[in-house]
Image: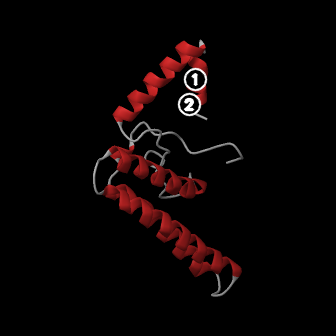
Amino acid sequence: MSYGEEPARASFYGADLTKGDVDALEEFFAARVTLLAEQRSPGSGEARMACALELSVGILIDELSLWFDDGEPATLTERMRAWNRVVFSAWPSQGTAGYDEDRWQLLSHANADAAEKHTRFRRNLATQRRVPRAALDDEAHR
């Protein structure tokens, strides 16, 4: 992982997320933080950083959990944004045991309607600006 890289983009939408996805991320972090805390003496800098990680990610997961009450577009957009913040927190652990590379990916759209709207917008923009579509596709994944 280097500057400018980011987690993979998902082929699914915010509407496809479940509470089970949130629970899996929460369990993943809890297991790592517990291991970190057990390996360090209480009060050490490393133990304090494990506590900071637990608190920070806990806040992100709590916020993500708030966005499962309904399927309204605004709710789905907030769910997607909250999910992406948690995925960025988990991403440094990619390749380790328990990391779900197929599911813990960045979301680009809240639902299929939002994806279609974005596609129409890009087509319109390409027509207006006469920008090759391939260039727009490259920009969409940056």
Residue 80 higher or lower than 122, as above or below: below
Q: Nearer the viewer, residue 110 or 89?
A: 110
Q: Where's residue 99, x and y in %? A: 49, 55
Q: Amino acid at mark 1?
A: Leu
Residue 5 higher or lower than 38, as above or below: above
Residue 117 higher or lower than 92, as above or below: above
Residue at 46 percent of width and 53 percent of height: 83
- Tag 2 residue: 140
SS type, badge 1: helix
Query: Can I make out residue 132 in this image?
Result: no
Residue at 49 percent of width and 18 percent of height: 124
Residue at 39 percent of width and 42 percent of height: 110
Residue at 57 percent of width and 81 percent of height: 38
Q: Where's residue 93, x and y in %? A: 57, 57
SS type, badge 2: helix
Q: Is residue 120 left or right of residue 130?
A: left
Question: Do the numbered discs 2 and 1 sit on residues whose CB atoms are within 8 Å?
Answer: yes
Q: Amino acid at mark 2?
A: Ala
- Tag 1 residue: 136
Q: Quadrant of the C terminus?
A: top right
Q: Distance of mark 2 from mark 1, alpha carbons? A: 6 Å
Q: Is residue 94 left or right of residue 78?
A: right
Q: Where's residue 109, x and y in %? A: 43, 39
Q: Is residue 45 left or right of residue 21?
A: right
**Quarter-wise, where is residue 15 in the image?**
top left
